[in-house]
Amino acid sequence: MQEAGQSTIGNTSITAGSPWVFFGVTFAITWGCWLSAIILGVSFDTAFGAVLLLIGLVGPGAAGIGFTYLVYDSGGRSDFWNRIKQIRRIGLRWFLVILLIPVVVTIVAAIADSLLGGPGAVWGEGIQDLNVNPLAILPALFFATLPPILEELGWRGYALDRLQLDWSAVAASLLLGVVWAVWHLPLFFIEGSFQREVVGFATPGFWLFMIGIVALSVVFTWVYNHTSRSILGIILLHGWVNFVSETVEVADPFYYPTWVLLAVLVVMIWGAKTLTNVDEVPRPPLTPRS
């Protein structure tokens, strides 16, 4: 029985639900906007640049919703929205895990930095300037809300499920992590972006950033598979990671390797196949669309 959006040419099955097709559409939307900003020399600090930034950010989420409606029947579509709405999927224990992970990572990285003579953790610019300018906190609030929502509707909301149909949880996480990291590449060439202004292209910070995203992908899958595939849980985790990193800063050579260490520990303790203590990962409904 074929899935919706699947056709056969000779002996070759072409499936519209393939994660690779999803990645292609996502990159077309996002890179189409962000490469336009590069070609036109537009800064994200301008009104037009902000529009291009936002439309680019919509890419994963828009593709995730679109492919959900293309591939799944009414049961699959309901499952998608339930994973956003149902708080009970997360549970108290995993809600606490979500809250603690970024804080513990930051503390461990700060301690390591301090032991080697560094400053440890320092308040981010938004917190330092809060008394003078209450609006200084807005960038941190932006990165903690809109990007996680727009991204996770696609990355974990759609793509991770599809990858885990054919790959182990770790392999799916690493593949998605690499794609997720590469998706950010244009930002390193656009004025007004954090990636260009603070990190820089092909710098040590660039490689730490890219590796850190792959490590985050493993940790996100670990939480996702333990919370009945909760998209809401991953949006909360993604947003909280962004907020903590924006408000409490730790040197990149300690911060990102700590995420790598956490990812390694997760794999060692829970196993590469599912990143859980069960043999099978939670699966999406795969009945064809009527």
Image: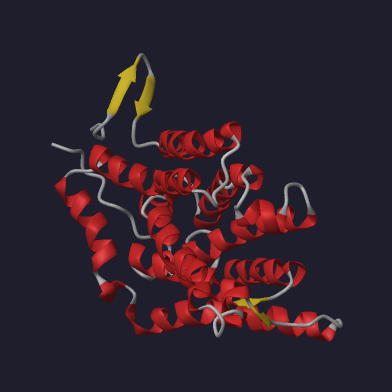
Residue 165 in sight = no
On the rendered image, what quadrant is the N terminus found in?
Answer: top left
The scheme the figure's colours follow is secondary structure
- Residue 204 picture location, percent across and down: 79, 56
Q: Residue drawn at (65%, 47%), measured in percent from left and top?
A: 188
Q: Position of residue 106 (x, y in %)?
A: 64, 79
Q: Nearer the viewer, residue 183 or 126?
A: 126
Extreme residue in the front direction: 132
User: x, y percentage for residue 236?
Assistant: 41, 70
Residue at the image position 56 percent from the left and 52 percent from the top = 177
Residue situated in front as seen by the camera: 276 or 245: 245
Tell me if residue 185 can be seen: yes
Q: In the picture shown, does residue 28 fall above or below 90? A: above
Name the foreground residue: 178 vs 244: 244
Q: Quadrant of the C terminus?
A: top left
Residue 47 is left or right of residue 113, and the answer is: left
Q: Image quadrant of residue 149?
A: bottom left
Percent of width and height locating residue 155: 43, 51
Is residue 111 toward the left or the right of residue 67 in the image? right
Q: In this orientation, which residue lies closer to the viewer: 153 or 122?
A: 122
Residue found at the very far top of the displayed protein: 10
Location of residue 271 by image quarter: bottom right
Q: How many marks?
A: 0
Residue sitting at 51 percent across and 58 percent down? Answer: 273
Q: Is residue 2 left or right of residue 216?
A: left
Which residue is located at x 28 percent, y 62 percent?
83
Q: Residue furthest right?
A: 117
